């Protein structure tokens, strides 16, 4: 078996592991296909949006969404890259709506796709940032109630999880910088964040959306 055949075999095994809901495998898959994913996101994102949102931030958001949603991903219908592209399309659409649909946002509350940059973090606590991050348009609940519950859920996390989440969502650091600060690999941090957010979602499962 030559190198190309072995490489293809490795990818096939990796894809199968992703389809079995292996988050470590998904993180590796995203790393291996980062350039392809970046090219796709750039191709569907207009320059006017890229002037407001960094491409790398969009990639990180898609990666985080993938790791968080792996347990329910339709991988019996789509290949991993096709699914990632679906997530990318949704993320770009959300970013367009957030930044350019003036009718649906308060002009005084414009913020990054992450729910606020470093300038906002002093006025917006970690609990509120996570509440924004974890609340979708189809699953909106009372923000004040959810913030209290997020605080309670955060208290149940380990210190390492708290540190990683705070660095990512309050300080807005990319996972590579968080990895350096915590002495871990980028992949390990993304997996840690994914598992932590999934744990928070489970702890908040009884907070039902309002209609």
Image: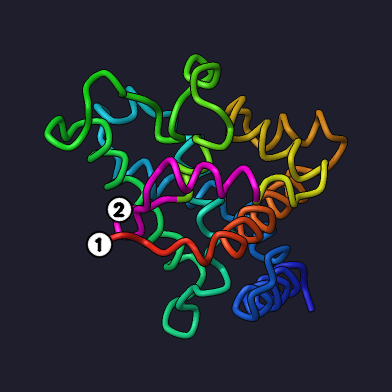
Residue 22 x/y as whole percent: 69, 72
Mark 1 residue crowding within 10 angstroms, few (<14) / some (14–19) / many (20+): few
Q: Nearer the viewer, mark 2 or mark 1?
A: 1
**SS at mark 1 in the image:** loop
- Asked whether, in this view, residue 23 is left or right of residue 119, the answer is right
Residue 98 x/y as whole percent: 27, 36
**SS at mark 2 in the image:** helix
Magenta residue check for 165: no
Q: Which residue has dot 2 on it?
A: 137
What's drawn in magenta, residue-wise?
135-152
Residue 165 x/y as whole percent: 67, 39
> Which one is nearer the viewer's eye here, 83 or 142?
142
Question: Quick check: 122 above or below 168?
Answer: above
Instruction: Quadrant for the N terminus, please.
Output: bottom right
Q: Which mark is residue 211?
A: 1
Residue that protrudes farthest toward the left in the picture = 103
Question: Quick check: 63 above or below 114?
Answer: below
Looking at marks 2 and 1 on the same chain, the residue that comes earlier in the sequence is marked by 2
Q: Residue at x 48, y 43 (%)?
A: 131
Q: Residue at x 39, y 50 (%)?
A: 40
Q: Which mark is residue 78?
A: none
Instruction: Quadrant for the C terminus, please.
Output: bottom left
Residue that protrudes farthest toward the bottom in the picture = 76
Residue 75 x/y as whole percent: 49, 78
């Amino acid at each position: 078996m030559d190198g190309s055949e072995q490489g293809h075999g490795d990818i096939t095994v990796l894809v199968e592991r992703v389809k079995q809901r292996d988050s470590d495998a998904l993180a590796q898959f995203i790393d291996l296909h980062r350039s392809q994913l970046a090219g796709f996101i750039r191709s569907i994102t207009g320059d006017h949006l890229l002037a407001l949102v960094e491409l790398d931030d969009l990639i990180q958001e898609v990666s985080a969404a993938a790791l968080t949603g792996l347990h329910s991903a339709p991988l019996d219908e789509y290949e991993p890259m096709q699914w990632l592209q679906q997530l990318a399309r949704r993320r770009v659409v959300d970013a367009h709506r957030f930044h350019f649909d003036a009718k649906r946002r308060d002009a005084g509350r414009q913020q990054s796709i992450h729910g606020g940059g470093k300038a906002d973090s002093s006025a917006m606590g970690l609990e509120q940032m996570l509440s924004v991050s974890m609340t979708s348009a189809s699953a909106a609940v009372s923000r004040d109630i959810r913030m209290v519950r997020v605080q309670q859920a955060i208290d149940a996390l380990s210190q390492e999880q708290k540190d990683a989440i705070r660095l990512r969502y309050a300080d807005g650091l990319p996972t590579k910088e968080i990895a350096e600060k915590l002495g871990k690999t980028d992949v390990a941090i993304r997996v840690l964040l994914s598992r932590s957010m999934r744990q928070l979602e489970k702890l908040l499962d009884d907070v039902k959306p309002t209609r």
